[in-house]
Image (cartoon, rainbow, N blue to C red):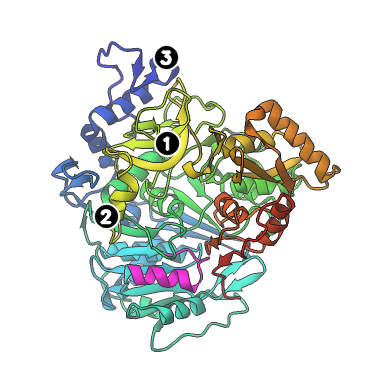
């Protein structure tokens, strides 16, 4: 289907030199017209895209915005996510096509799972779940690593019309407990163990601890998938609570496969908790109809993926990227989705990204910039990756954090394809701004831009008083209502917080809580979370712009800049940087050179003087640098680290570095919920 389907190829005689604020001469006409229709007549535009899916019952109303911000799409339409992901490919004769490639250097295994094999496992598991009492509307928690069985569990649950809530496998018992208490599941599906470099994580023990401390009545059963040949496995089943996955499959073996249960387009598909929700769970509730339409549309139009292509989203099933673009998006489309259970640099070497692309003929990748920074730091000359061919690769898409110019240039030079930055959030479920391969857009958008608005998104930059910012003026990024299909429907069990958090500050808009600006061609620049903007003597400076300038220095491989209090200016930037391996310069000399670089690039307005080197920076497992945690630590505040932190011991060195600069002098040790060892 044409990416602009539903749009016409003429501008309807519009006597204007711009479309929705974007100059006509600067952009692809097909994109502009599709975008204009998605804004001016969203019902017509999104009705056309809905035909990408199979529906049990057609919708009665495409768009119902009678109760904003609780917008509904495809009202009265019924469908099933499992049917669209699996069954329709079987009925279409594509059952032998490989659906998932699970490549796990951590276990030394590779599995290619066809659509038929997925179907066979899903219907058995769904049959067993049904016999255990799971029905439409029930919630089931999944606590599993990045393995095909996680997707099998997700699809078996939604086959019955039930709702899954996947909890990231890196969470410890307390975090898992808070999600179990909030979602109140009928069952929990878990693996016995997970695998990390150098250790085995006892998922089952963590689950037992979480249930023991939970105030919610225990789930009726825990279904345990036992990963074979992973040692040491010290976990033990509790015969009163646990049942083996293999035994659940046997419950319906030989019986007629359980049919897909059609659910209304605005019924829940899943609940996914955002990071940092230990004390107050914030569960994003996603409905089925609009979400699947958005995923089908973006996978084709944005990422340029067709049925049969191999696509790799380098993420985890516990994050929104895993839901959208490891599971539902590629499977609904009929593509092959890569599941890589490993690290970019040390399982066993920095050549793994190159190997995956070459071995499986990957068409496009979605990853975070940090993954490539790690590869660059470990193997800047690409001695491990040079042996592999990148001929299948069309583009690399990056998101999740700011990508500096030096890293982007290195990726493009190394992988020899465009590196396209785009921007979205857990709440949106798919991209808000991007450069789309499905249109004739420039594959060299402005440096640091996250692209142009996607269909249905009216992106505005507002000042704190609600007035619109000028071109290139930094402000708060907001999205005009109604939002297009695929966005969260509400926060589970907390509609009041949903209204207050996202819609109260700027009435009529969704508040992204990100800062950025728009240029004269309509490109969007996301500079930081709004609380990452530093106010230096009344001048607002983005941390990302300062980091970009630091990374221009050839001896710097990574950096974090954040604001700290200063008596005269209110706030000043503090910089912690990581030098390249075997750097010959002293810390003092290199720091002096960076200060001069900032003065030349940004100017003295930055008041950039607090700087020192470190060996590592604190990050989450998804690759995000924890600037706010470091800023709070510098101010001697109590810091509670999320369980997703990759290595909490880094704060020992961070304390030393900050105290060297006169900060964190009395900061208490950060509190973190650690995994069981």
- Residue bearing mark 3: 25
Question: Looking at the image, which residue is at 34% across and 55% down?
Answer: 90
x then y, percent, for residue 670: 59, 64
Relative to 569, is 260 above or below?
below
Residue in the picture at 39% in, 63% down: 280
* Image quarter of residue 583: top right
Res 236 seen here: yes
Can you name the residue that lies furthest to the left here?
60
Between 609 and 61, the one lying in front of the other is: 609
- Residue 3 pos. (x, y %): 36, 32
What residue did someone put label 1 on?
476
Q: Residue furthest top?
A: 15
Which of the two discs, 3 and 2, labels the residue nearer the N terminus? Answer: 3
Q: Which mark is residue 419?
A: none
| Circle 1 Cα neighbour tier, 10 Å, few/some/many (<14 / 14–19 / ≥20) | many
> Does the magenta run of residues contain 170?
yes
- The quadrant of the picture occupied by the C terminus is bottom right
Q: Observer-nearest residue: 302 or 218?
A: 218
Q: Nearer the viewer, mark 3 or mark 2?
A: 2
**Residue corresponding to mark 2:** 496
């Amino acid at each position: 289907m044409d990416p602009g389907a539903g749009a016409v190829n003429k501008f309807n005689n519009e006597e204007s030199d711009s479309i929705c604020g974007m100059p006509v001469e600067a952009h692809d006409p097909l994109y502009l017209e599709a975008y204009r229709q998605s804004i001016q007549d969203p019902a017509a535009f999104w009705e056309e895209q809905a035909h990408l899916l199979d529906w049990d019952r057609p919708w009665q109303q495409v768009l119902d915005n009678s109760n904003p911000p609780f917008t509904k799409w495809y009202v009265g339409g019924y469908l099933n996510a499992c049917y669209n992901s699996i069954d329709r490919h079987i009925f279409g004769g594509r059952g032998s096509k490989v659906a998932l490639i699970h490549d796990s250097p951590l276990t030394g295994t590779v599995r290619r799972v066809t659509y038929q094999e997925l179907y066979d496992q899903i219907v058995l598991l769904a049959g067993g779940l049904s016999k255990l009492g799971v029905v439409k509307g029930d919630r089931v928690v999944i606590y599993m690593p990045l393995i095909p069985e996680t997707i099998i569990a997700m699809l078996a649950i939604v086959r019955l019309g039930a709702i899954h809530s996947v909890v990231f496998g890196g969470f410890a018992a307390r975090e898992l407990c808070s999600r179990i208490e909030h979602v109140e599941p009928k069952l929990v599906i878990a693996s016995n163990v997970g695998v990390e470099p150098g250790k085995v994580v006892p998922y089952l023990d963590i689950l037992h601890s979480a249930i023991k401390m939970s105030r919610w009545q225990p789930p009726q059963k825990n279904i345990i998938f036992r990963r074979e040949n992973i040692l040491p496995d010290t976990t033990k089943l509790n015969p009163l609570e646990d049942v083996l996955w293999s035994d659940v499959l046997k419950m319906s073996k030989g019986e007629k496969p359980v049919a897909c249960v059609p659910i209304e387009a605005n019924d829940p598909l899943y609940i996914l908790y955002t990071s940092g929700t230990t004390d107050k769970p914030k569960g994003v509730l996603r409905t089925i109809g609009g979400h699947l339409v958005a995923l089908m549309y973006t996978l084709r139009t944005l990422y340029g993926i067709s049925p049969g292509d191999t696509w790799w989203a380098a993420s985890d099933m516990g994050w929104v990227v895993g839901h959208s673009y490891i599971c539902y998006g590629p499977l609904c489309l009929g593509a092959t989705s890569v599941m890589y259970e490993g690290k970019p640099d040390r399982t066993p070497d920095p050549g793994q990204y190159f190997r995956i692309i070459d071995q499986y003929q990957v068409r496009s990748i979605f990853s975070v910039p940090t993954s490539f920074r790690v590869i660059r730091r470990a193997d800047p000359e690409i001695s491990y990756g040079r042996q592999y061919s990148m001929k299948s690769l069309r583009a690399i898409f990056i998101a999740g954090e700011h990508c500096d110019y030096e890293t982007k240039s290195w990726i493009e030079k190394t992988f020899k394809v465009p590196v396209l930055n785009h921007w979205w959030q857990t709440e949106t479920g798919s991209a808000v701004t991007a450069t789309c391969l499905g249109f004739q857009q420039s594959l060299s958008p402005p440096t640091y831009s996250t692209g142009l608005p996607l269909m249905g998104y009216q992106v505005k930059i507002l000042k704190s008083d609600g007035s619109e910012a000028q071109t290139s003026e930094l402000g708060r990024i907001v999205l005009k209502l109604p939002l297009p299909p695929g966005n969260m429907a509400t926060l589970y069990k907390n509609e009041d917080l949903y209204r207050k958090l996202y819609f109260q500050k700027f009435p009529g808009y969704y508040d992204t809580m990100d800062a950025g600006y728009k240029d004269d061609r309509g490109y969007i620049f996301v500079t930081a979370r709004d609380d990452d903007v530093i106010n230096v003597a009344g001048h607002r400076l983005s941390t990302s712009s300062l980091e970009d300038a630091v990374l221009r220095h050839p001896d710097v491989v990574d950096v974090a800049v954040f604001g700290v209090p200063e008596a005269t200016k209110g706030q000043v930037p503090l910089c912690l940087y990581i030098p390249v391996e075997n750097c010959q310069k002293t810390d003092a000399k290199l720091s002096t050179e960076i200060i001069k670089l900032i003065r030349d690039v940004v100017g003295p307005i930055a008041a950039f003087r607090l700087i020192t080197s470190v060996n590592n920076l604190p990050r989450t497992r998804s690759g995000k640098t924890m600037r706010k945690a470091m800023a709070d630590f510098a101010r001697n505040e109590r810091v509670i680290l999320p369980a997703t932190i990759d290595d909490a011991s880094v704060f020992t060195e961070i304390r030393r570095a900050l105290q060297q600069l006169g900060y964190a002098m009395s900061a208490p040790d950060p509190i973190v919920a650690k995994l069981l060892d």
